[in-house]
Image: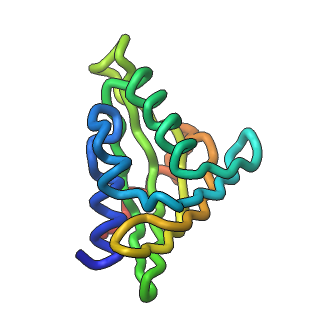
Amino acid sequence: MSPKQIVKSFYESDLANDSAVIDSYLHKDCLLHWNSSTGYQVFDYDGLDRFFKNIRVAYHSVRPQISHLLQDENQVTIRYTLFASTIEDPDNEVALANFISIWEVKDNLLYRGYEISQVADDNIESYKSFSEIKV
């Protein structure tokens, strides 16, 4: 698979239910630098494994709506809105946050990530900016 296909496949995998996703897509030496609404964090492989374990405990499903997916050699940029439904209310899917992530792919695995996110809002123009682009 190309780096672009690897990144797309990772984001479209069943992150809320499949514990094998981490081993299948993340390099053992990976680092994710994440600027979120709560501040800056760096996750290594083990930190991301713990993060996704918490996702699997809290959410019934998570789903990205990808608006942009761009590749430049082994670097891939993805822009998306993350939707989720909780275990308590699996029929109610809500937008959690908007993300832009840049991944370096090494050995066909996600190696270095740089991510920025912000809480999703109900602004219709914002939603349109994510839904009008076709990947």
Residue 97 picture quarter:
top right
Image height check: is 11 above or below 75? above
Q: Position of residue 81 (x, y in %)?
A: 45, 49
Which quadrant holds the N terminus? Answer: bottom left
* Viewer-proximal residue among 110 and 39: 110
Q: Is residue 97 left or right of residue 64?
A: right
Q: Residue furthest bottom?
A: 73
Residue at image position (54%, 38%) is 122
Q: Percent position (x, y) of residue 20? A: 28, 43
Residue under the point 35% across and 57% down:
25
The picture places residue 14, in percent across and down from the top left corner, at: 27, 41
Front-most of residues 72 and 122: 72
Q: State the quadrant of the C terminus.
A: bottom left
Q: Is residue 99 above or below residue 109?
A: above
Q: How is the image coloured?
A: rainbow
Q: Residue 6: which quarter of the image?
A: bottom left
Residue furthest to the top in view is 88
- Front in this rendered view, residue 27 or 84: 27
Give left or right: position of 32 versus 17.
right
